[in-house]
Amino acid sequence: MGRRVSIAEAAQLLRSHDKILILCHRSPDGDTLGSGYGLLHTLQALGKTARVDCADVIAERYSYMFPQEVSDFEPEYVVAVDVADPKLLGANEELWGDKVDLCIDHHGSNRDYAANLLLEADSAAACEVLYLVAKELGVEITPLIADCFYTGIATDTGCFRYSNTSVRTHRIAAELMELGCHFQKINQLMFETKSRSQLAVEAEAMATLEYHYSDRCAMITLTRDMVELNGASDDETEGLAALPRQIEGVWIGVTIKQMKDRTGYKFSLRSTEEADASAIAAKLGGGGHARAAGCSVKGDLLFARQAVLTAIAEHMGWEEEKVD
């Protein structure tokens, strides 16, 4: 178990080192990338050598955050951002999973794997916390840094629609707007732009829609064939997680995605206040937030569907439904 640190202590740890590696989680989203690149630009403003590393390919739509990075170097300090579990580092877990010096996160399910942990579970996004760290470091928050932090906050709150959005979330977003972030461009790119392949995948996934537990649970499935035959990237499937929960009367939305190696399935869980998505995911070895969480299982689709339905029934105290 690592040492819990404050924002001021985390900032001091960063000040004390010069060659810093920043790790993002696999299947990178706006929050881990916004946190990673926002911190990168902040550290570079302090004259430090730093780079961001992610095990998976980063989607082109995030390219406005990409800097002219420093070439490879041997890090003396390793920081993970928005990474609740070293398993989420993907291929980087073997290299760095047990060498993380500082983790900055907002997931209550954090495994406490780093030597030092800055955890604010009430924050809507890791970028909220990173912004406060950047301010503590005393650097000028440039429009580029503001773009990074705004991206993470906007995407993890569903453009400020999700229940994790707080008064502080809005205040920080307003500060970032005042600092010159290109919020209109970012919102359009993240929430109002879809490729044809993305729309095709969404249509196929929604065709698999099924209801359980008196229609209080809705589930859709996305196979690798759906993704590959439509020429979609994995990044383009991110928005699917929100769709089942948006159906009227649904308390728990489940999106099942087949793993790239086809050995199992990942679950994205979204819930209303009637259910705790994180508690459901924890039953299958995962975690996350009360309204949004994830987990995975090895096995075929029938096994995966039954596993998540069993976990839901156990959490809600419902009579378990069987799939066929």
Image (cartoon, helix red, strand yellow):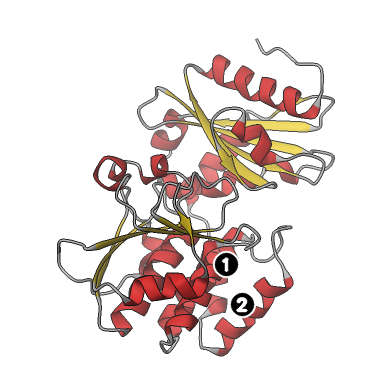
Q: Amino acid at mark 1?
A: Ile
Q: Determine whether 42 is above or below 257 in the image.
A: below
Quadrant for residue 77, please give it. Answer: bottom left
x, y percent for residue 304 = 56, 21
Residue 199 point in image, percent of width and height: 54, 47
Q: Is residue 155 left or right of residue 18?
A: right
Residue 317 vertical placement versus 136 (above, below): above
Judge whether 256 appears above or below 166 on screen.
above
The 10 Å Cα crowd at callout 2, few under 14, some 14 to 19, many 20 or more, is many
Q: Position of residue 110 (x, y in %)?
A: 52, 47
Res 79 label: none
Residue 180, x across and y down, in percent? 51, 88
Residue 153: mark:
1
For the C terminus, the quadrant is: top right
Amino acid found under the numbered disc labelled 2: Ala
Dot 2 corresponds to which residue?
173
Q: Which quadrant of the view contains residue 75? A: bottom left
N-term mark: 1 or 2: 1
